[in-house]
Amino acid sequence: MHSGSSSSAHTSSGFPQLDRRVLREAALAHLARFGTTRHGLEQVLLRRIARWEKQALKAGADTEEVAEAAQALRPVVAEIAEEMVRLGAVDDASFATARARRLVRSGRSGRAVQAHLAARGVEADLRDAALQDAVEGFSPAQRELCAALVLARKRRLGPFATPYVADDEDADTEQALARRHKALGVLARAGYARDVAEQVLDMPPAEAEDWMQRLRAES
């Protein structure tokens, strides 16, 4: 099948063909609802082709004919994605910056943000730039500290524990040690370094709230 064939074309069994116009419309519909990267858009369109393959085969279309048609459409996916980039509908840098800002403010560590953006096909230099700009006026260390504090607040850890108990008040009790070990584990699994986790758990509530206010002021 030629990639520019009419959407009214059918396979030999009568099942409607998939073509460039339909894929482009699918791309525009997706972009109207969601922000994504070039890689993300390509994956959406490839899944659209895979669904068409499955439906065509289920309808009794010839296996070889369907496979050839799907293969011919795959280069079209890259062409459509490139067109969306040229039109400004897809911008990996803008996507990465907006997503990094949102993730940091939801308590994600720099490591977690990097992994999230990498999984969506964002190049390393754009990931680094997005993290750098995630919180204006904050150093990387300050950004990481604030993100960890957000997570601590969500999980009621350290200065956000209820009731709050300073370490020096019950530092020798088994309960305190167990509580601290559990909190360190939560922060470590979220991607935070041990020194950041320790700083968060040792921070007095008033100081933690000051950091939260600074983060909100930059939002």
Image (cartoon, grey):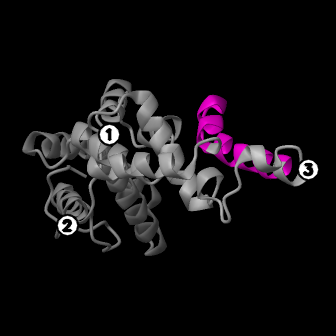
Q: Mark 3: few, some, or many residues within 10 Å (few <14, many ≥20)?
A: few
Residue 176 relative to residue 150: left or right: right
Tell me the kind of residue under disc 1.
Answer: Ala
Residue extending farthest to the front is 169
Q: Which mark is residue 134?
A: 1
- Cα–Cα gap, marks 3 and 2: 73 Å
> In terms of image quadrants, where is residue 21?
bottom left
Q: Amino acid at mark 2?
A: Ala
Q: Secondary structure at mark 3?
A: helix
In the image, what residue occupies the spot 64% across and 51% down? 158
Choose between 27 and 16: the one closer to the eye.
27
Any part of residue 219 in sight: no
Q: Which residue is mark 2?
A: 9
Q: CA distance from mark 1 to mark 3?
A: 39 Å
Is residue 184 something that shows in the picture?
Answer: yes
Q: Which quadrant of the figure has residue 60?
A: bottom left
Range of residues picked out in magenta: 177-200
Q: Residue at x 66, y 65 (%)?
A: 162
Query: Residue 15 placed where, x, y %?
Result: 32, 73
Q: Residues within 10 Å of mark 2 (few under 14, many from 20)?
A: some
Residue 39, quarter of picture: top left
Closer mark to the observer between disc 3 and disc 2:
3
* Residue 46, image x, y percentages: 37, 52
The residue wearing badge 3 is 174
Residue 160, numbered label: none
Q: Earlier in the sequence, mark 3 or mark 2?
A: 2
Classify 157 as above or below 93.
below
Q: Secondary structure at mark 2?
A: loop
